[in-house]
Amino acid sequence: MRDALRFVAHHEKLLVTFIVFTLVSTFAFNYGVALPKLADEVWGNEKYFGWVLAVTSFGSMLGALINARKVRITYRWVASMTIVLGAANLGLAWAPNVIAAFCWAIPLGFGGAAMISSANSISQQESPPDMRGRLLALTAVAFLGSTPIGGPVTGWVADAIDVHWALAYGGVIAIVSGAAMLVWILSRHPEHDVAGTTATSQA
């Protein structure tokens, strides 16, 4: 982990990617906390939680397949998929019924899967062979290890502020993070679009 952190700290583009990835993983993927309460209190049936997750999984499959078909994965694509994920979080948070929730669940899964797989692809392609396993470990910590932080925060937002914001606040963070990354790309590295990498390792 220390080796991976040192490597990322000296690689500007990977550092920005990992910061965005960690923020979004911590606050925008807490479906298991927010959706049960939305299903029960807003959509009228707690069983809709499972159905919405199933539709989200369908969107995730589409996102992974589209990502695997891309010849080049770019930092711009990672930022764009982060924004898609955030927008879908907002839409799902205020979906008035379960049908609308199904419609928003597809881009939610699509954006999430595409963001994760493309960020992982870039981290592998931008690193030397001896660092790839270490960066995979860092990615796992950023995505899975952040749950003990994001989960309780999401639960507190649902109980203390509003059930809609329990999902929406993560969407806001994702949109702001993706937009900031996109601005950074266009201002600092427009000539690369940025540092495009092949998707073959992720596929």
Image (spheres, grey):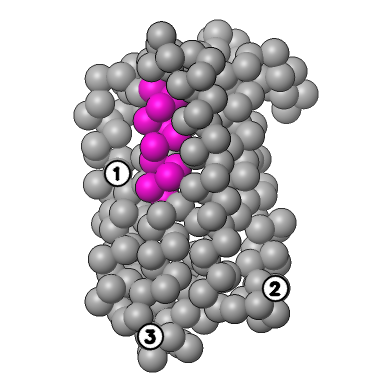
Residue 47 versus residue 35 in the image, above or below: below
Label 1, on which residue?
63
Find numbered disc 2 in the image and state the secondary structure of the residue it sits on: helix
- Asked which quadrant contains residue 143, the reply is top right
Neighbourhood count class around disc 1 (C-alpha, 10 Å): few under 14, some 14–19, many 20 upward? many
Mark nearest the camera among 1 and 3 is: 3
Q: Tell me the kind of residue under disc 1.
A: Gly
Q: State which quarter of the image contains the C terminus.
A: top left
Q: Nearer the viewer, mark 2 or mark 1?
A: 2
Task: Indicate left or right for 184 with 11 as reference.
Answer: left
Residue 120 located left or right of residue 44: right
Query: What range is drawn magenta here?
Result: 74-85
Residue 82 lies in the magenta-colored region: yes
Q: CA distance from mark 1 to mark 3?
A: 26 Å
> Which residue is disc 3 drawn over?
43
Residue type of the residue flagged with mark 3: Trp
Q: Is residue 166 visible?
A: yes
Q: In the structure shown, which secondary structural element does the residue marked by tag 3 occupy? A: loop
x and y, in percent, of residue 77 in the image: 37, 30
- Where in the figure is residue 97, as x and y percent of width and height? 32, 82
Disc with the residue nearer the chain's start (1 vs 3):
3
Nearest to N terminus: mark 3 or mark 2: 3
* Whether residue 168 is situated above or below residue 129 in the rendered picture: below
Image spot of residue 84 (x, y percent): 38, 47
User: Mark 2 sits on what residue?
Assistant: 156
The quadrant of the image that shows the N terminus is top right
Q: Are circles 3 and 2 on residues that touch, CB within 8 Å?
A: no
Q: Amino acid at mark 2?
A: Trp
Secondary structure under tag 1 reads helix
Task: Give the Cα distance between marks 3 and 2.
Answer: 21 Å
Q: Residues within 10 Å of mark 2 (few under 14, many from 20)?
A: some
Q: Residue at x 69, y 65 (%)?
A: 153
